[in-house]
Amino acid sequence: MEDLLIYIDIALVTKSVVACLIGFAIGLEREYRNKPAGIKTFALICLGSALFTHISIAFQGPADPSRVTAQIVSGLGFIGAGTIFQSRHMITGLTTAAELWVVGALGALLGLEKYSEAISCLIIIYIYFIVSHLIQKIVFKKKKYFLEITLEAKENIPMIEELFNENKIYLTQRNWRKKDKKYKFECSYSVNPVKNQEIRHKLRMIEYVIGIIN
């Protein structure tokens, strides 16, 4: 056992553990909001970036370590693109993609053994989360709403999405299901109370909208 411990790279193990913890911490926010990427994805991306950076600086000879870091950025671009969805001029997943990009950068910092810098950035990120939430809630007076809209046909769903889009209401979540030969369109969004009343009134005026439930 003692012989095995001799060959273990303690620095690499430390980087891996801290990377998983930081990725987990940032992923909690996305997991809480039921986004496509959660704690596992963020932890693994942060770990992967740290490992690739560790490997790049471990190279001996004239190799340029920055090339590996550049490839990390390119790879994160592909992963981030997979979290972005577009439907009828409505784009979702941009924040998740941006956070994946940032957590990859934090992993690279850990790979360079910049622990204090990475932890400082993590604290800054969480401070930003808190401040932006307060600004959204207090300054813009936005609240989160959930609606279940009963429709006559499946073809009505894109029309409802277009109505929200025309009124500049960003749907954070949306889903539909068929029940009793009717279609239930479920959605959530954040707006001020006045705008919420306006969109509910417009929905009630539509013929193919059978009912609305909070």
Image: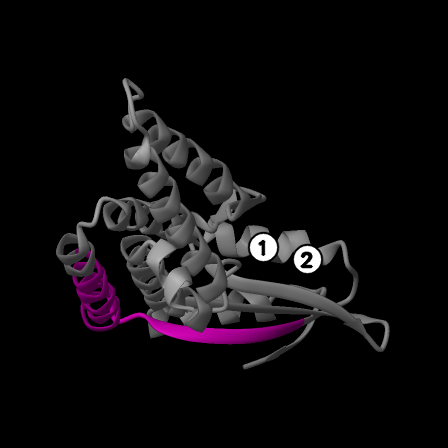
> Label 1 vs label 2: CA separation?
6 Å
Height in image: 70 above or below 148? above
- Extreme-right residue of the structure: 181
Q: Which residues are magenta?
A: 121-149
- The spot of residue 77 in percent (x, y) is 44, 36
Residue at 51% in and 48% down: 83
Task: Please name whichever residue, 12 or 5, is drawn nearer the observer in this view of the structure.
Answer: 5
- The spot of residue 178 in percent (x, y) is 79, 70
98 left or right of 37 in image: left
The disc labelled 1 sits on which kind of residue?
Answer: Glu
Residue of label 2: 157
208 left or right of 20 in image: right
Q: Secondary structure at mark 1?
A: helix
Tell me, yes or no, whether the highlighted magenta stretch contains residue 80: no
- Extreme-bottom residue of the structure: 214
- Extreme-top residue of the structure: 62
**Quarter in which the N terminus is drawn:** bottom left
Residue of label 1: 161
| Residue 170 visible within the image | no
Task: Please name whichever residue, 51 or 147, is drawn nearer the observer in this view of the structure.
Answer: 51
Residue at 49% in and 63% down: 40
Disc sitting over residue 48 in the figure: none
**Quarter in which the C terminus is drawn:** bottom right
Residue at 21% in and 71% down: 134
| Residue contact at pointers 1 and 2, CB within 8 angstroms | yes
Our reading of the magenta stretch's main secondary structure is helix
- The spot of residue 33 in percent (x, y) is 44, 69
| Residue 166 visible within the image | yes
Q: Where, by quadrant of the figure, is residue 118 drawn?
A: bottom left
The disc labelled 2 sits on which kind of residue?
Answer: Ile
